[in-house]
Amino acid sequence: MKKKLSVPVVWKIAVRNLIEHKTKTLIIGAIVAVGMLVLILGNALLDTATAGIRENYIENFTGNVILSGKTEDGITFFPFEQMMSDSSESPITPDYFELKEYLDGSDMVASWSPLISGMATMMFSDDIMMPTQVFGVDIEKYREVFPDNMELLDGRLLTPGESGIMLSTTAVALFKQANGRSPEAGDMIELMAMTDRAGMKIDELPYVGSFTFRNAETNPMLPMICMTDYNSLRSMLGMNLAEETVLLSSEEESIIGDFADEEIFSSAGDSGGGLFADVMADEGTNTAETLFAEIGDRSDVESLYLEDSGEWNFVTVKLVGGVTSKAAIKAFTEDVSLSGWDIQVNNWIDGAGGQARMTYTLKTVFNIIILIIAVVAVIIIMNTLVVSITERIPEIGTIRAIGGRKSFVRKMIVSETFMITFVFGIIGILGAVLILAGLNAKGLHFENIFLRMLLGGSVLNPVISLKTLLLDLAGIVFIGGAASLYPTAVALRIRPVTAMQSN
Amino acid sequence: MTKKFLFTVFALLLAGGAALWAADSEPDFAAIMESMDMRSKFEGTDFSSRLTIITEDPEEGVEKQVLNQFRNDDADEFLMITLEPLSKKGQGVLIVEDNAWIYDPESRKFTHMSMKENYEDTDAKMNDFGATSYAEDYEVARYAEGKLGDYNVWIVEWEAINDEVPYPYVTAYIDKASELLLMTKEYSLSKRLLRSSYFLKYARIGEKYISTQMIFKDETMDNTKTTITISSVSLDEVDDSIFTKSYLERVNR
């Protein structure tokens, strides 16, 4: 009963103290309010950006889940990024025909589409050429998964079974530069690709139309992606060829592996005979005629071509409403493992590339910065409270002298800190909500390409969730609590006699 | 008079000795480079050979290609046709003076390419296949003497004097005895080591030399290298019609 009554007394004293030490209350309060404001604004901007990027990529490029061949380098839909890694080509998704049946039968899957992602050079003239990224798609299935991801700028979309190419805005600009006019239906676009499997391949594809991906401004690589039918791209990249076995002679086997510079030029590492090989000029071995005999008939090459190799780089999966990516990835991973398929199950962000991942990284960096600021805030608040307590030594000593227990003093200090952080935290929240309401109504417009990439669009309408608000408030109250620990310990060390010794 | 005579003799001896010392310690690298170029160039005769290219890559494994090469160095003409693997059979590279084309027998189409580019996915550049032009492309910046395995070598630092070469800085290890190139370390503009080339074997054909075993190691990636072995060397005359686009089309019937 006595304890229950003591709470209001403590709160009363705490309020009185806060009013009496206005300056210090305002210093701590201002730190709390500004901290809260920055925290909420920063979180709102990054939450909105990451949500926007997530929705943009899932709806337009990646789907919720991506299935691919296994790779240690990580996957990306953007082969330019792939080139920066050790592996220049995207992995092939194995067991495609079995996977196809599995996805058709899965109640988690709303729609799915396979995709080939490769690099080719577009040759507009002898001088004007452009390395480009090409998506090879089954247009019917692709449109099922991504019905609204393309804005047609000219011509039409590919039709099922048609061989052709849809050009990106960058490719159209270069076509115009080379030809002095825009591409028209029936124009042939020359492409050259170089792969390990097929070597140098050159092909011409009829121009069908030009397009831009929705929200293409969020990623500078998007305006470079052209789209073809999967058969054409598969042929360019040699994905329609049966694997050949490499046969090496014993002499050729012996040169495989690494070596040291010195070793290879010493008699121990030398293949024998010193610097000069015993090579004599042969006569009549390499003539135009002998090559006609060796190359002329290409029927053996034709036997390598497969009607449907089932080779795709990725399979993009859209999930039915209510199924989370996390749950789907878990279920797919288990099923893939049980089936013994060598398939990797990836989250959408894995295929979205570095640009999308950058925003997520930035969010982590922001949170680390907030943590550092929180530590600094704790120190400042703590220091201000210690000064305040030092000034109040006679008062606290007197409370102790007239029978005030240590727990009473502790409650008093904690109550003061809690009140400051809560009240000024609310003020910070109100300020942030007001600013956010204004920003949301007006929209933040970005001209800078870097900011567009980072924040997922040219216009950002930041919003904050109630969950984030409450978490931020709890965080700031925690900071207040942590900051009061040391000042409380200082206050508890004050003895009644101290009050009598001071003025 | 005697003093003057002795002084003159001494001065002459000193000058002669200095000249001899200079001749011994400062070899004429420009002449060596010209000699290397001349010896790699088959003037007055055509050249053909068979190349076996073995590419090792940690990601892709081991790949083997067999190609036929024809050269007419007098006319700056070059043709290379792939024989193996089957998937690349009939693909060709035709170089006439400064123009290079590649040919795809499947689509029966040609397209231009740059001499600075790698040959397919190998570590060999297009200009690794023809006669060298070190004297035209590089000048000597520094040199030293050294040893490379069993060989006494000049270690010469070259700097490019034009932008047509793939590597602006090269350190060349030249065998003192034969004045043949044994190894090069090739650097970027920022002096980052990009590639190491090893010329392990040479074939001597009259006054000419051709490296018959070369290794190109990509220094930007671990365990990535290309070995080129040359066999069936022939100095038979090559018909001019071989160095044409129509030959590449005709040979792929």
Image (cartoon, rainbow, N blue to C red):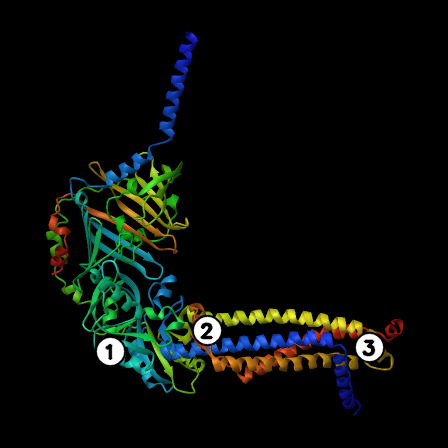
- Between the residue at mark 2 and the residue at mark 3, the CA separation in whole angstroms equals 52 Å
Pointer 2 and pointer 3: residues touching (CB < 8 Å)? no
Q: Residue furthest bottom?
A: A1
Closer to the chain start, of discs 1 and 2, is: 1
Q: Which residue is mark 3?
A: A396
- Between the residue at mark 1 and the residue at mark 2, the CA separation in whole angstroms equals 31 Å
Viewer-side residue, B38 vs A126:
A126
- Between the residue at mark 1 and the residue at mark 3, the CA separation in whole angstroms equals 82 Å
Query: Which quarter of the figure has residue A478?
Result: bottom right
Q: Which residue is mark 2?
A: A455
Q: Which residue is mark 1?
A: A156
Closer to the chain start, of discs 2 and 3, is: 3
The chain ID associated with circle 3 is A
Where residue A373 appears, x then y in whole percent? 61, 70
Residue B178 appearing in the image:
no
Which residue type carries mark 2? Answer: Leu
Which residue type carries mark 1? Answer: Arg
Q: Locate the C terminus of chain A and report the quarter of the image it occupies.
A: bottom right
Q: Identify the residue at image location x=59%, y=71%.
A: A371
Query: Which quarter of the figure has residue A320?
Result: bottom left
Which residue type carries mark 3? Answer: Ile
Q: Disc 1 or disc 3, which is closer to the eye?
A: 1
Q: Residue furthest top?
A: B1
Q: Identify the residue at image location x=40%, y=68%.
A: A74
